[in-house]
Structures are given as structure tokens and as C-alpha cells.
Image (cartoon, grey):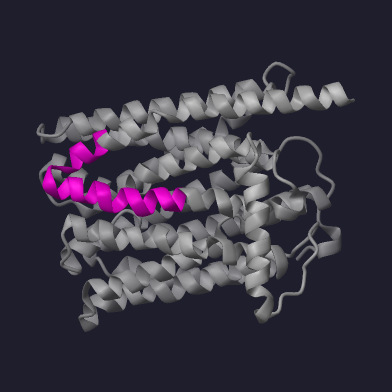
Amino acid sequence: MTSRAAQTPRTVTAAYVSVTGALTLAASLIWGIGTIFLMEVGGLDIFEVTLVDAVIPLSQLIFEVPTGVLADTLGRRFSVLLCIGVLLVSTLLYWVTPLVGLGIGGFMLASAGLGLGWAFHTGALDAWFVDALDAAGHEGHKERHFASGRLSSGAGMLIGSLAGGLLGQVDLAWPFVARGALLCVAFAITFALVHDAGFSKRRLRLRELGLETRRVLRAGIRHGWQSPVIRPMLWVSGVAGLFYMYGNFAWQPYLLELLGRRSIWLLGAVQAGFSAAGMIGNAIVGRVMRTDGKRRDPAHVLVVLAACDFVVAVGIALVGLLAGAAGVVPAAVAIVLWLTWGFIIGLYDPVRMTYLNAHIPSRERATVLSFDALFEDVGGAVGQPALGWASRRSSIAVAWLIGSAALAVAPSLYARSGRAAAEARASRASVA
């Protein structure tokens, strides 16, 4: 293993790719079948499923800032390891809940644990990666490095989703057991490869946690909410959270409804296809974001982000309009639109992450990224039960159309961020 002192941008990226791929492989085993497990094994209806799932972003919302404190004081490596450990316990609780009859309360407790686990992860791994790259001597833009991590995540998601669908076709509980085993592997990889670099840990006593939390929250507000460049991006995250979390969970029963038959393996295969489409999106990031002067204009970055959101909003509306046309052809059209969404996400995510990091101070990086995720959590905590209620009162398709309308506001928010960034550059230029 390469020593910490001998780290290079290549070895740092290799560690990031390895950890991201291993964690996504483990986590994605249940992503294609989780809703069906809750409905068929857990005995919940679609509204109860959205209530259980809404606990995840609500838990993240509660814990985002305290876990950001831990990441920015005790270390990003420590935070990621805690993430994996908590995810392991929560996954096993999901598996045990129907066996011992804990009902919806057991699933909600497990979801709260998942939210806590992902809160430990939010911002911590990406913040570690940016600082470690800089400490290793990397210079220049980082879209391709982030895209490498997203490619690894996509590969893990492809394999995990496909495997989860095949295991779920036999027994819907098996993907949860396999996920627990692979989380242990992800923990070992993280422990071996991730070491804090380019970042100075700070001591944190338990009695100081409240004070430090307030300090970090103020920093998040100052560098996030009070930044005219970052604030519109926070609202984008909130708008996305209104639908994205619900959409991922509601997609599974909706596809089976369109298809007209129970095919658990197909859910895994389609989720794997979503991952493959995302990998293609990751792979073309370098082409879309060419490094010549014209393409490095920040306005171009925001045009790419706005175009991605617009295409997703239109695609989601089209999926909703397929309601009532059950059969192989409508299901195939919905799958194509779903895969298009995966492709857009693969292109969008590295570009957005690089744009955000360019406007965040290193010392507060994990905190502000967690603050960004907090807005998405608020959106998810509100959107999932609201759209779940709409699904039960009307249909899943109606909820998708509502989500599409919410996403349509994102391009105007990107324009606002772009104007603020241009004004900031002009101000710096006049001072110089």
C-alpha cells in the first residue's frame, strides 16, 4: 500500500474510486427492489412506503450539521467509517423487522439509521478527495477526477442493482443480507486506503459539540446561504429533493404497473441500465467541459447544468403521461426515459460538484457540502409524504407530473447563481 507521504493525484483518485465503487456496490443491492420489499414482505401500501422513506431525509436533516462538525474536526476518514458502520446496522434492522413483526415502526427506525449513516457520508468523502488531491500536488480543474469516482459508483450500482434483482427474484430478503456482507468489505477498503491529507484535524470534546455545531452552522450560513453564488444552488437541491427521492422509490411499483406483471429481476436489470447510462454521462464530462478558454467560461458550466435539469423535467412529465396505457410498449418507453435520466445525472453531477467546490473555502468544505445536502433533505422530507399522499389519493403518475413542474424552476436558479458569480469576478478584477 502506498504510504500517505508518497500519495500522488493518481493514488488519491484510485483510493476515491475504490471506496466509492465498493460503497455503492453494497448500497445498491436493495435500490432496485426496496419498495417492493416494503410492500410485499413488510405489508405496507404506497403511502406508508413513502412515510418510511421520508424518515431517511428527515434523519439526514437532523444530523447533517452535527455530522459535518465531526467531519471538519475529527476527520473525514472517521466520518466515512462511521457512515458504513451505521449503514450496516440499519440494513440488518430492515431485514429483521418483518421476521420479528416490528411493523412500520421497525422500518422507520431502520430508515432513521440510514439517514444518520448517509449524513456521516455527505460531503465528507468528496471533501477528503478535494483536499487530498490538492495536498498531493494536483493543479487545475477536477471534473474528470470526480467523473472517475462517478464512473466507479455507476459500475458498482450496475453490478449491485442487477445482482439485487436476481437475488430478489428468489427471495426479497437476500439482497439485504448480501448488502450487510459487502458493507463489511467497504469498511475494510476505506480503513486501508483513506487517510486525511491537506486537512488539519481539531480536537472536539463532547461538551464542546453544541458550541462547535453552532460555529459550523454559522460558517455554513456564511459561506452557503449568504453567498449569492451558492444560495441559488441550495434552492436547486431543495427542489430536486422534492421529487428525486420519491421518484426513485415510486419507480419500482409504477414500472410493474405499466408492465402488468411481477418481474423483480427486471427492476434490477433496469436499475443496472440506469447505472450504465450514468457511466456514459460520466465518460463524456471531459468532452462537454473542454478546457479551452471558451468552454471554461462559468456561464457555459451553468448552461450545461440548466439544460440537464430541463431535459430531466420533460422526461419525468412524459413518464407520468404514460399512465393508463399498460403494456410492453408503454413500459419500454418509460424505461428509455428512465435511462435518459440516468445519463443526464451522470453528466450533471461531476459538473455541479466542481462548480460548488470552486466557491467553497477548504476549511469549511465538508460543512457547506453538508449544508447543500440539508436542503435536499428538506425537499425529500416534504416531497415524499406529499407525493405519496397524492399517489394514494390519485395515482403515481399524477405525482410524477407534480414533480416535473417543481423541477422546471431550476434553470432560473442557475441563471441567478451565474449572475452573482459574474458580479463577483468583476468586483475582484476592479480591485486588482
Q: Is residue 225 visible?
A: yes
Q: Position of residue 416 (x, y in %)?
A: 56, 26
Among all residues in the image, which is located at the extreme bottom?
100
Image quadrant containing the C terminus: top right
Residue 374 vs 343, above or below: the answer is below
Depth check: give the residue in front, 103 or 228.
228
**In percent of the image, x 61 and y 21: which residue is there?**
300
Q: Is residue 268 visible?
A: no
Among all residues in the image, which is located at the extreme top?
294
The range drawn in magenta is: 376-401
Q: Position of residue 221 (x, y in %)?
A: 62, 50
Residue 396 vs 314, above or below: the answer is below
**In percent of the image, x 85 and y 47: which residue is there?**
137
User: On the rendered structure, is 81 left or right of 309?
Assistant: right
**In percent of the image, x 60 and y 59: which residue is there?**
19
Magenta residue check for 198: no
Depth check: give the residue in front, 199 or 221.
221
